Image: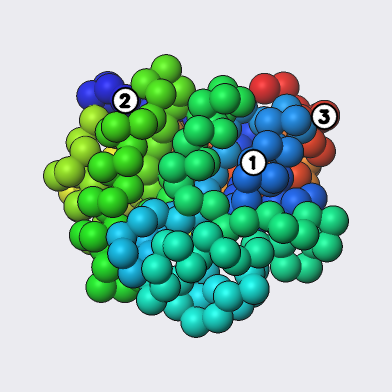
Amino acid sequence: MTDATGPAILATIIAHRGASGDAPENTLAALSLAADHGARCVEIDVSISSDGVPFVHHDDTLERCTTGKGLLCEHLAVDLDQLDASKGMPDYAGEVLPRLSAVIDLLEARGLGLNLEIKPRKGLEDETVEAICKLIEGRWPAHLPLVFSSFSRPSLTAALHRLPAVARALLVGAIPDNWQSLVLQYGCRNIHCDGSKLTATQGAALRQADLGVYCYTVNEVDRARTLLKAGAHGVFTDYPKLLARHLET
Ligand code: G3P
Ligand code: MG
């Protein structure tokens, strides 16, 4: 965590929701497997329980990935702790829905950098950012890379004001025409974008502007090579083992 400028470097290969092609997404098992598979950095999605505890989970609702029902933000942390998050991957039965605090412990133990995607329920942006920042400022190991990103512009604003020293990434699908003003407005050092939409011209312009460029979700080696040539510093992938075998990191 510094007030540095220029690209906030994570890693060439970032395990998207952990090694989520081989283990249940956003779980401790998936993050640990990402480290086993050679990743040096992971991406996770974070939102909060009804009592303001940050949990690592992609969707607003619990059904797709867990044994729970309804909105994550309407459940107490102690109840979320009881859920099984291994849905669809029986080999991982018993894998919990992780609190962000448990993830930080694991990342420190495994020496993994982090792109923390702030994924608030709409209307809970400030509470979500506050809960995340409180944990991060007390617990994040300063020697490991850390970048906040979000599709939610109110969340980027809240993060900028609450913990400006943590680098921010503008998270987008295609690169918007007004990317320069957005980057300035939210004080972003990086842009994280949909790899299927980035052109070589855009990649060059982003690099020329001294921004960090990371692309999601890239599960093919050739596509990763093309994006790296087009200016990406790295890619998010569900299969870090596959990419680590073929790319220089
Ligand atoms: O942060 C990159 C990527 O995770 C953004 O999309 O929907 O997978 O969270 P999503
Ligand atoms: Mg994400």
Q: Residue 39 placed where, x, y %?
A: 67, 31
Residue 55 quadrant: bottom left
The label shown at residue 205 is none
Q: Amino acid at mark 3?
A: Arg
Instruction: Say whether disc 3 or disc 1 marks the residue closer to the N-terminus.
Output: 1
User: Is disc 2 surrounded by few (<14), some (14 to 19) or many (20+) residues within 10 Å?
Assistant: some
Task: Please name the residue that numbered disc 2 is placed on.
Answer: 1
Camera-nearest residue between 6 and 145: 145
Left or right of 31 on screen, residue 211: left
Query: Is disc 3 surrounded by few (<14), some (14 to 19) or many (20+) residues within 10 Å?
Result: few
> Can the viewer see residue 153 in this picture?
no
Q: Position of residue 217 (x, y in %)?
A: 63, 52
Figure check: 60 above or below 204: below
Respond yes or no on whether mark 3 lies under 8 Å from ligand 1: no
Horizontal side, residue 113 vs residue 186: left or right: right
- Is mark 3 in CB contact (under 8 Å) with mark 2? no
Which residue is found at the position 44% from the left and 42% from the top?
A: 101
Mark positioned earlier in the residue sequence (2 or 1): 2
- Mark 3 lies on residue: 245
Task: Label 3, secondary structure: give it.
Answer: helix
